[in-house]
Amino acid sequence: MVKKGISRAPHRALFKAIGLSDQELERPLIGIVTSQNDIIPGHINLDKIVEATKKGVLISGGTPLVFPTIGVCDGIAMGHEGMKYSLATRELIADSVECMVKAHGFDALVFIPNCDKIVPGMIMAALRLNIPSVFVSGGPMLAGKYKGEAVSLSTLFEAVGSVESGKMTKEELKELESKSCPTCGSCSGMYTANSMNCLTEALGMGLRGNGTIPAVYSERIKLAKHAGMAVMDMVNKGITARDIITKDSIMNALTVDMALGCSTNSMLHLPAIAHEIGFDFDIKFANPISEKTPNLCHLAPAGPTYMEDLNEAGGVYAVMKELADIGLLNTDCMTVSGKTIGECIATAYNRNPEVIRTVDNAYSKTGGLAVLSGNLAPDGSVVKRSAVVPEMLVHEGPARVFDSEEDAIAAIKGGKIVEGDVVVIRYEGPKGGPGMREMLNPTSAIAGMGLGSSVALITDGRFSGASRGASIGHVSPEAAVGGPIALVEEGDIISIDIPGLKLELKVSDEELAARKAKWQPREPKVTTGYLKRYASLVTSGNRGAILKSSADE
């Protein structure tokens, strides 16, 4: 498009200005999209992944050209106004890639993400562009070691609460701080980044090991070379992103999500990915899938195993083989390898049934996520069921109502939350936040104070993949648009029934109607800049917090 013919002589001159030869211009131009930067631990090694990918492209006859995207470290953004920007970057990433590719006429793309919103943002872009595309992530961090136990970032967040409650000293916290994140890579448990990188494999957009090979392993470098080779094979065969990501492959990903026990954030990103192919993904799809999908993995924070353990046990493909053997996957879906899912997983096997449990010995017969509905969440809410202790699967308690994350944390750390309470944090949704902040600090504080088995937390915001306990997020409609969560009053009894998929406010319809009549919208928290524009366009959590366009109105 930008290289051939007399009229493109000026274009070729500009390509030659960056040092390209005629021979290089005759080859397919392969965009290498990287989110490498110096501030995100999962991204500081991406320069090595880029170089390896370029070698793979060159080996197979392409011309690689690198360009960047932005990225946010959710851990560093946690607990302050920075978290308002995290989810909002997903759309910026998708838009920026679309702009770069359309402007410069790339023939194909290799995407190199690693952390939370970058992965889905890049997948969204790949689907919009619908050209040959392969993903190769930077890989997960190795778990840390502290007093003979494996630890991770979630351990550290919870340790802060332990110091506040006198269960840990500041000196111990300092030592843990130095040991919990020992290498580069995406944080070592089944948090959002690793969830999405694993689901990229399940979608067919990443090669085997994309989600699990540790960042510091040489095998990760080899994988990047193979990704570069794979995209050239796709170019030659005319395979594009929408040939791979279909309704069937998205439902495959949702099934794998349930088996792995992925982050609740996947229930924002899968609908957003589905939207790019015109698939109206209802989060309530999760429940019938969950009912028939066993939960096979309990990686941190749900259990004591980490991504390196999952990799050694056979990785995502071993989990998929367990599921395919009982007929839960569509094995005819295409992958970037040029093979079907069935062909890819044919040789996979479970090397460690303690890490990947067999179907007959599953952690539970139902999947890792559940969507709860009721008069408190008419459009749904999401909970990581696999990370909830048994005694909190069914719970009733009085509402402790807070209109911001900061107020809730102050109450928790101030000892004002007691056993049995249901903490409600509202006006933190996509529009009300704006930006739908993660509530890792409050959930960690609850766990660190020793209340994880007796206190629930409900919010129209969202949770980190590192959150555990009865943490119910994405309550829709959100408070900012007058959803029922805006009508909850201090002391109201809230009923949580996770097996029954119910979230109810024990208040009469008449009383709720009376409260609704008195409710008034709040003044926006942010009135300038990108977040103002984001708040005006963003939809609810149950729709994946996608942005409205004229077609969506």
Image (tube, rainbow, N blue to C red):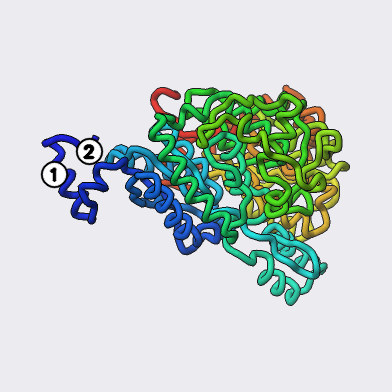
Looking at numbered disc 1 in the image, what kind of residue is underneath it? Pro
Give me the residue at 67% from left, 45% from top: 315
Q: In which quarter of the image is the C terminus?
A: top left
In which quadrant of the rendered view does residue 208 lie? top right
**Numbered label attached to residue 10:** 1
Sequence-earlier tag: 1 or 2: 2
Residue 508's x, y, as percent? 77, 25
The residue labelled by disc 2 is 2
Q: What element carries label 1?
A: helix
- Taking the image as shown, residue 332 lies to the left or right of residue 348, namely left
From where the camera sits, is residue 93 visible? Answer: yes
Question: What is the CA distance from the residue labelled 1 to the residue labelled 2?
Answer: 10 Å
Give me the residue at 52% from left, 56% from top: 221
From where the camera sits, is residue 118 visible? Answer: no
**Numbered label attached to residue 320:** none
Looking at numbered disc 2 in the image, what kind of residue is underneath it? Val
Mark 2 Cα within 10 Å, few/some/many (few <14, many 20+)? some
Give me the residue at 67% from left, 27% from top: 329
Residue 84's x, y, as percent? 52, 49
Give me the residue at 68% from left, 28% from top: 286
Q: What element carries label 2?
A: loop
In which quadrant of the rendered view does residue 41 lie? bottom right
**Residue at the far left in the pictured view:** 6
Mark 1 Cα within 10 Å, few/some/many (few <14, many 20+)? few
